[in-house]
Amino acid sequence: MAGDGVRRRDFINIAAVSFAGVGGLAALYPLISQMAPSADVLAESSTEIDISAISPGQAIKAVWRKQPVFIRNLTPEEIKAADAVDVSTLRDPETLEKRTTAGKTNWLITMGVCTHLGCVPLGAGEGEVKGEFGGYFCPCHGSVYDTAARIRKGPAPKNLEVPPHEFSSDTVVKIG
Amino acid sequence: MSFPWANEYKPTNPLMQWVDNRLPLPRFVYNAVGAGYPVPRNLNYMWNFGVLAGFALVLQIVTGVVLAMHYAANAGVAFDSVEHIMRDVNWGWMLRYAHANGASMFFIVVYTHIFRGFFYSSYKAPREMIWLLGVVIFLLMMATAFMGYVLPWGQMSFWGAKVITGLFSAIPLVGTPLQQWLLGGFAPDNAALNRFFSLHFLLPFVILGVIILHVWALHIPGSSNPTGVEVKQESDTVPFHPYYTAKDGFGLGIFLMVYCALVFFAPNLLGHPDNYIPANPLSTPAHIVPEWYFWPFYAILRAFTSDFMFIPAKLMGVLAMFSAILVWFFLPWLDTSPVRSGHYRPLFRKFFYLLVVDVLVLGYCGGAPAEEPYVMISQIASMYYFLHFLVILPIVSSVETPQPLPFSITEAVLGKDEHATLAPATPAVA
Ligand code: FES
């Protein structure tokens, strides 16, 4: 080995330092990973919600993964208003149909978490302002959502997220 | 390094001699903040604020450590444990108010210190490293203060945590996973509260470490001074002790008067009443604002309301907010004037005061609700803020004719310096 200029000592040196380096990186992984959501937080608890008492035009706030969920029974006018919008003009183009379950387009189920920085928008509670598009209004930095909870104005980049959900019966919806 | 005429540490006490020969710690202190550190003789009161900032940090560490003996970092009991401190713990109310207002005082002092740096161009060669470390300290302070504000687990704590970690979700692709990693969940909860407590306890000591580097770097060229002319001779300096220990002592007295007035007569003046409501993940307070010391940056964040080219408004706001501080890192190279002090730079001085006004306007808008006219004003003020650093400063420093500098600090103070006739005048920056 001396012939090609690589000494035994160089090899040992590089091997030892590389070994220590890999070991160090391996030790770093758990230190970083421990900060990610833990198993109990991740456990996708699903919530069943009775929606029989929500009449058209009303909405309730439910809780899923410790975050608010808006369940809204849209009126025919609200549905019409949402359908009247040319989807291509939207910041996050989606139709109301795509955001709801077929045959149950009046049930708009979204996260109550503004896609800007995470405040809870107003509009689901009794007497709260709904904003100029009749959906939701986030007072933190002024994002306005329409009756399909799509972003129409303000700094938020996306529509209110639709959580995975299915109707277990006509009056019960399961979120998660 | 120091000037050749610096006093030398000569302990007369045999015990101190014994210590000095084995661990020269007293010598180190003597040379750093004692009679062994020669300092320009003409420092004004603006030079008090470095020492005051150090004092404020010690204050925060001392009050913080004792508060940690009573506080419980668990989302179920955190709010109550703070009320327990306020009502049941002996002197708890005072310690907590001292800690909360201590943070405000720390920021007042540090902002003054930073703007002192702006006016006297303290960031210029050969002091760039001191400046860069200072910006690092400021960033660490902001992180520490933010996490501290979350600990009482009131409404503002909770929503502050949500909004500020929400900033990270603006980063393309990795944003949302990153936010969840920071919080240890989908929204702020126990995991977030616990880690914020851990880091809130740790970071002040990291700050302390960076301050040691900051002061170390300061002692290489020595302190700057209001003329911006470098020290040339022994008559330009006086020993730090007793001259500036006394002057800083006076400043400290004023500091403590203001501080005590806040703690004892207006402890909640700078706080927000919503934080006395326990955190409620289902309801956002109508008007959420951070603590006052973040207002200028918060205004910049909110100034971006529509998408800009390919960049979504949300990301743009976040980028702008961070850039507002990161631009300070480039200051030593953006300002190319050979003259340091604003006293001798008439045009620069005007723009400096304009910047002060601009930041105050931003601060006011950042504390106001997100509606017109504040949004519009923040937009204009944010634009001016960046214009100042990126355009005005480089242009001003190349077109302006500075006023003549004194030959030396001695001449500036006494009106004459007998060395002035013996040596040719030298440029301010060697
Ligand atoms: S969090 Fe809703 S607009 Fe900013």
Image (cartoon, rainbow, N blue to C red):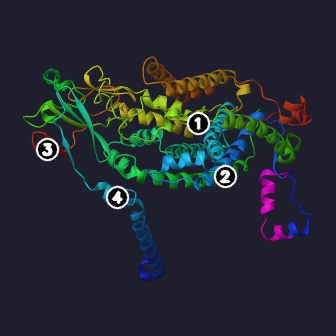
Find residue B3 and report its horizontal and vertical position in percent.
82, 50
Marks 3 and 1: which is nearer the front?
Answer: 3
**What residue would you read off at disc 3?**
A166
Amino acid type, residue under disc 1 in the picture: Leu
Please name the predominant secondary structure of the magenta segment in the image: helix
Q: Which residues are magenta?
A: B18-35
Quadrant (top left/top right/bottom left/bottom right) for the N terminus of chain B: bottom right
Does the magenta segment cover residue B24?
yes
Is the Cβ of the residue at disc 3 closer than 8 Å to that at disc 1?
A: no
Marks 3 and 4: which is nearer the front?
Answer: 3
Label 3: chain letter: A
Identity of the residue drawn at 75% across and 43% down: B223
Label 4: chain letter: A
**Both labels 3 and 1 in a single chain:** no
Find residue B426 and report its horizontal and vertical position in percent.
78, 35
B255 over B189 or under it: above or below: above
Q: CA distance from mark 1 to mark 4?
A: 43 Å
Identity of the residue drawn at 43% across and 36% down: B319
Find residue B280 and report its horizontal and vertical position in percent.
40, 40
Identity of the residue drawn at 25% across and 53% down: A44
Classify mark 1: helix, strand or loop: helix
**What residue would you read off at disc 1?**
B331
**What residue would you read off at disc 2?**
B62
Does the magenta segment cover residue B250?
no
**What residue would you read off at disc 4?**
A38
Is the Cβ of the residue at disc 1 closer than 8 Å to that at disc 4?
A: no
Task: Report whether A30 appears left or right of B200.
Answer: left
Q: CA distance from mark 3 to mark 1?
A: 56 Å
